[in-house]
Amino acid sequence: MRINAHILFGLMALPAAALAACEAEPATDIRPPSCAGSTQPGPTPIRRLTRVEYNNTVYQLLGDSSYPANAFPPDEEAAGFDNQAAALVVSPLLAEHYMGAAEELAATHTPALIAQLPNCAGGGANSDSCSGDADAFIRSFGKRAYRRPLTEAEVDGHLALFEQGATLGETDYAPEVGVEMVIQAMLQSPHFLYRVEFGMPNPDGNEVVPLTSYEVASRLSYLLWNTMPDATLFAAADADELRTKAQIEQQARRMMDTPRAREAVKNFHRQWLQLGKIEPLISANGKNPEIYPDFNNGLLPLWRKETEAFIDYAVFEEDASVETLFTADYTMMNQALAEFYGVEGPSGSEFVRVNRDPSKFAGFLTHAGLLALYSKPDRSSPIHRGKFVRETLLCQAPPPPPDIVPEPPSVDESQTTREQFAQHSADPLCEGCHRLMDPIGLGFEHFDGIGRYRETEWGLEIDASGELVETLDINGPYDGVVELATLLGRSEQVKNCVATQWFRFGYGRVETEDDACSIDEINEAFAAADYDIKELIISLTQTDAFRYRRAVSAEEAS
Amino acid sequence: MSQHKRHHLSRRTILRGLGGVAISLPLLNAMRGRRARAGEGDPPKRLLIMYTPNGTIAKNFWPTGSETDFSLSPILAPLEAHKQDLLVLGGIDMLSSLSGPGDAHQKGTGQCLTATELLEGDFPGDAGLSAGWAGGISLDQEVANHVGQATPFASLELGVAVQGSDVGSRINYRSAGQPLPPENSPYAAYERLFGDAIADPMAVERRAARQRAVLDSVADEHRALRDRLGVEDREKLHNHLIAIEDIRTRLDQGVIKFDGACQPLEQGAYIDPEVVANMPVIGALQMDLMAMAFACDITRVGTIMWTRSAANHVFSFVDPMIVEGHHSLAHKGDQDTVKIAQNTLVSAWYAEQLAYLITRLKAIPEGDGTVFDNTVILWTNEQAKGNNHSRHDMPYLLAGSAGGYFKTGRYITQDGDVGHNKLMVSLLNAMGIETETFGNPEFGTGPLPGLV
């Protein structure tokens, strides 16, 4: 089977890390061998704001909570995430939406912002009295919109637009129209809609340049918060204090300790674990009401929230490692969800911690939402559950199904699901690929098609034993999901998979050969922190890929 | 943007304008006058694409009989009233989609209008296969490049419950790697096309003056930034800039005036366009809007994309017995008579939608005939057969003659391997574009024989 090169890459870094640990040197001074050459930041494409980032950014910039980007065409999704620079484009339709949103936002917020231009107020205001205020407003608002100070040429351009706008109102001199148009223009500027980076001035024509402090501020805020920099980051950038690893780490740690970081981490997991599919896909296909009379669509948001709340709690309240996400003996429920599970304790709509029987349940793998998502309307689906583990958690892709697939057996109350799918292991045509999925998925057989624990299936005894094959480090038999979760939680392959996904989400692109040093550094830091998720995220801010970029050569730019 | 602006005309006015039968002579004259304003001699030709996914059921799709004397199949039966306007095209293969990156669904959808290989990229497909966006311009955009300048919108892309945003959910491409997303909301699309026409003209002119100034400033900034960027980023900014310039150009083309068959639409109470069960209503609204866009000559190139590649929408609104998603149904073996019957119903429902669209266009007078007479509709699919992903013998169907170019009322079958590039060339020729090739010519050049 094919194992992605980057996984191997990540794993190959481990002996190096172990080696480094054996030498009695302070670990922080030792860089992986892959970092021995020149600084390699990897590709640094211009990044368009996603819908989430746009909404968050106008909230920070204007205090706007109308989520205007929800009406935009959906973000292009690649490599499992909606923020991949290579796939994000601006179509004519999106450009129109940008214009419409800019007009709405400007109309809504100009009445409050005009207070920043006191000399433009009143009937006697004119260009002479007002232009000083307009200049100041353009500089202050523009700096936050562009996430860096405006150039003098940019200030002049917006001042001209302001003056033109002041003549386009219903009165002779309408500064409020000028302000509105300046805001409209800034919200449609490429410096607002994209994260534009050129790096430090490059008089020597170097291939690689460090990012400016303002550029680092934006990288930090969009990575850790999915939004624009806050006042503290702007202040640090003003003082040019986002240049060293230590300065960046200090900010990253401050930022990680805020509610916005929790939202960004939630955004990652919603995409990586495909929690966002629980509601649309399950409601589209339904569940058979004769087999699952307790199912209703109202459960779907609770199922999604359970996994989100669990990860949020584990990462931020318990400093969870990857292993904990797999093996924790607790989850999060509110009253309605607890009633579905038949668990006593939670009351009200808030999700609270609930301890579970560790002989039956383990981490997020036994959450109803994911188990029901990877089920059929009338039964569990060992194939889809196994495929999820193989693809999403182990970062391995099983080969495609053949063109002609026999129809699956209909639900038969005289046989367990396991027995019905036995052909997959009996028929050599099926076995080659299905052995990569089914023996993983069968470990979940104590959970039915809506993700609830069952002792028996149709009164028949359940066999939840399985076997892991073709993994890099956890091959072998196991019995039941708890043992499976323990193996996955310990696996280096899984940890590298997690780091790979964070690399893609954090940097908005897929890793390349040039990223060897950055990947090794991330893996080392992750291992050194005992695979603490928050430390992994912090480590993303310490790499060459994060702090540097390729310079645009003179020949390239026209 | 407000998506719920409503005009004040009565429902009767609208029905008379679009779907109704009572079109009076004065209205026809007004219509001619409007065409004259557009500076056209002959009525303009129009191209409309209808996309549906997951293949078809061959035995229930293809007609029986001869080229000119044939009976429509169960799936095509809803088109009986329009039989003489159809060209059923057997034996055409999506050969290009057997080549290049991507899985069967990605290639079938991404290449259905481009007829060339996909780019490399990170859209995950089946089994570790992956692909990027389409590798070339799509048919509709090639046509729009030739005829789009005459209308405010060069083309119009509408969707019905198109989920996601990846190579499987896009068929229209400005160029390689430049997809055009469909608008799923008929309410947003209506506002986009006709918002100015139904607003206070003074306010519209005031806003247009401001928009010109703002867009000029924004375009300058895009231009300046574009010229400082590296190759790939520059391409992105360049395409963004073109989109801004398009909006800017449209501001100088004036506001759509309602007259003749070009009349406002009553869209009824808002329902959620993303809900699968709402597809019948939303689909009809999108088709109404497309017909209106043609009636008002807002565009001459349209696409209606129904769902997406491998869509698993559940068509229980077609038959309550259908509880499985379309893609799952399409994967059932040929022996599963129940599921084959259900999948046939789904395909026939799509044919019924096409029939509605044709009826709509036939209700819009133009010259001595109707808008439909000057239109050709291509019904395309990502596959021929859902359960084996075959892309041979694609279920292609043309409706309308494009101003008498195609000789319709026939069922024509091609022999051997015939790439769908040739179908694309035929459609380009029908739209007055002289060319021998489209897409990757390795898979076929020249038009299909026997269509004209």
Image (cartoon, rainbow, N blue to C red):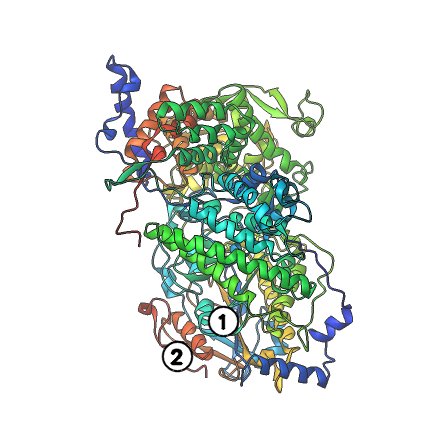
Decide which of tag 1 and tag 2 comes sooner along the chain: 1
Chain letter of the residue beneath label 1 in the structure image: B
Going 74% across and 80% down the picture, which residue do you hit? Answer: B22
Where, by quadrant of the figure, is residue B261 drawn? bottom right
Q: Secondary structure at mark 2?
A: loop
Where, by quadrant of the figure, is residue B2 drawn? bottom right
Relative image position of residue B166 (x, y in whole percent): 47, 51
Q: Would you name the residue on which mark 2 appears?
A: B434
Relative image position of residue A168 (x, y in whole percent): 61, 58
Query: Is residue A440 or residue A243 the one in the foreground?
Result: A243
Please name the amino acid that badge 2 sits on. Glu
Relative image position of residue A438 (x, y in whole percent): 45, 37
Q: Which mark is residue B171?
A: none
Q: Would you name the residue on which mark 1 appears?
A: B148
From what the image shows, is residue A486 above or below residue B283?
Answer: above
Instruction: Verify CB contact (< 8 Å) between mark 1 and mark 2.
Output: no
Going 44% across and 28% down the picture, which residue do you hit? Answer: A236
Q: Seen in the image, is B412 located left or right of residue A114?
A: left
Q: Residue furthest top?
A: A24
Q: Seen in the image, is A496 located left or right of residue A414?
A: left
Q: How many residues crowd mark 1 within 10 Å: few (<14), some (14–19), many (20+)?
A: some
Chain letter of the residue beneath label 2 in the structure image: B
* Quadrant that contains the C terminus of chain A: bottom left
Where, by quadrant of the figure, is residue A395 drawn? top left
* Quadrant that contains the N terminus of chain A: top left
Query: Is residue B272 or residue B98 the one in the foreground?
Result: B272
Please name the amino acid that badge 1 sits on. Gly
Query: Is residue A555 or residue B91 the one in the foreground?
Result: A555
Regarding residue A475, the answer to whether it shows in the image is no
Q: Seen in the image, is B382 located left or right of residue B193?
A: left
Q: Seen in the image, is A8 located left or right of residue B398?
A: left
